[in-house]
Image: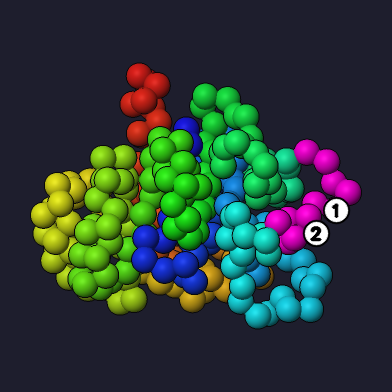
């Protein structure tokens, strides 16, 4: 199953950490094979969530995001690959594979061949019309992250209402608020409540991803008594929705 993860409003606020966490849960709790990738290169990549490594370049702490089709992207990808062959960048844990970002010469953004039952999760950024539209067309499901802001949500649906039929929407909350308001707002566009999730921003989670300790964070907070349980519950719900959608697609 090909799944796009996309921040529908902001390029600077990527969804790398959430996608990595959902991938781990699909692998460890639903026993699925998971492939992770992105169509951009930034100062914080998927592999950083799993492996605590010293950054290799001197601008590691200056935020950057090189978009697919840009010259900066091509140069950064060349530096990442160097003399390495193939598409696989890391296998950080059993059942999880991280890919190099796709080469601009490849015909498809979902460039890696996977089996029918594998979850291929791809983070995207930018709105370059051709490559952006191609990846949305290729995807089976689009996970769209939206902010806790009525005006931004309205702007998004004015521009991108075409993605609604195959989208799951995730409200990223700064504070736990009145979700029914946002459910009602999205219902105006024909979106049912089942296809809306919510996650409250969590500093401890983000710090664990920066330090390469995402797996430990998930393992350490499985108990219902954990202070992070409700946060992870929101992420698990999205993973379950994907798992159920895939089963339905396969006729299971």
Q: As rendered, which of 101 and 36 lies closer to the eye?
A: 101
Residue designated by label 2: 79
In the image, residue 78 lies in the stretch drawn in magenta:
yes
Residue named by callout 1: 82
Judging depth in this view, the residue of 199 and 159 nearest the camera is 159
Q: Residue at x 38, y 50 (%)?
A: 143
Residue depicted at 47% across the width and 47% down the height:
130
Pointers 2 and 1 in contact (C-beta within 8 Å): yes
x and y percentages locating residue 111 in the rendered image: 61, 37
Q: Is residue 249 left or right of residue 67?
A: left
Q: Position of residue 203 (x, y in %)?
A: 49, 76
The range drawn in magenta is 74-86
Local crowd at mark 1 within 10 Å, few (<14), some, or many (≥20)? few
Q: Is residue 124 magenta?
A: no
**Total number of numbered labels?**
2
For this view, does 147 lie left or right of residue 135?
Answer: left
| Kind of element beneath mark 2 | helix
Foreground pick, 16 / 130: 130
Residue 4: x %, y % from top left: 45, 46
Residue 154 is left or right of residue 247, and the answer is: left
Q: For residue 177, say whether it is visible.
A: yes
| Image x and y of residue 113, in percent | 62, 29
């Amino acid at each position: 199953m090909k799944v796009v993860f996309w921040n529908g409003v902001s390029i600077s606020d990527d969804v790398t950490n959430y996608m990595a966490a959902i991938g781990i849960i699909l692998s460890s709790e639903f026993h699925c094979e998971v492939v992770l990738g992105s169509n951009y290169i930034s100062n914080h990549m998927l592999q950083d969530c799993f492996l605590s490594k010293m950054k290799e370049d001197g601008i590691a702490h200056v935020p950057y995001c090189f978009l697919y089709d840009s010259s900066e992207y091509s140069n950064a990808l060349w530096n990442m690959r160097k003399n390495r062959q193939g598409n696989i960048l890391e296998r950080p844990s059993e059942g999880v594979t991280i890919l190099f970002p796709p080469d601009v010469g490849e015909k498809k953004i979902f460039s890696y061949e996977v089996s029918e039952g594998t979850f291929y999760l791809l983070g995207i950024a930018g709105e370059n019309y051709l490559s952006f539209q191609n990846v949305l067309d290729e995807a089976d499901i689009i996970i769209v992250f939206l902010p806790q802001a009525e005006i931004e949500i309205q702007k998004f649906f004015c521009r991108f209402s075409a993605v609604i039929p195959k989208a799951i929407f995730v409200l990223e909350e700064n504070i736990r608020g009145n979700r029914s308001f946002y459910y009602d707002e999205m219902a105006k566009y024909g979106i049912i409540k089942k296809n809306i999730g919510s996650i409250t921003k969590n500093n401890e989670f983000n710090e664990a991803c920066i330090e390469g300790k995402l797996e430990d964070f998930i393992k350490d907070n499985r108990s219902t008594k954990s202070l992070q349980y409700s946060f992870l519950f929101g992420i698990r719900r999205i993973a379950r929705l994907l798992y159920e959608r895939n089963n339905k697609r396969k006729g299971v």
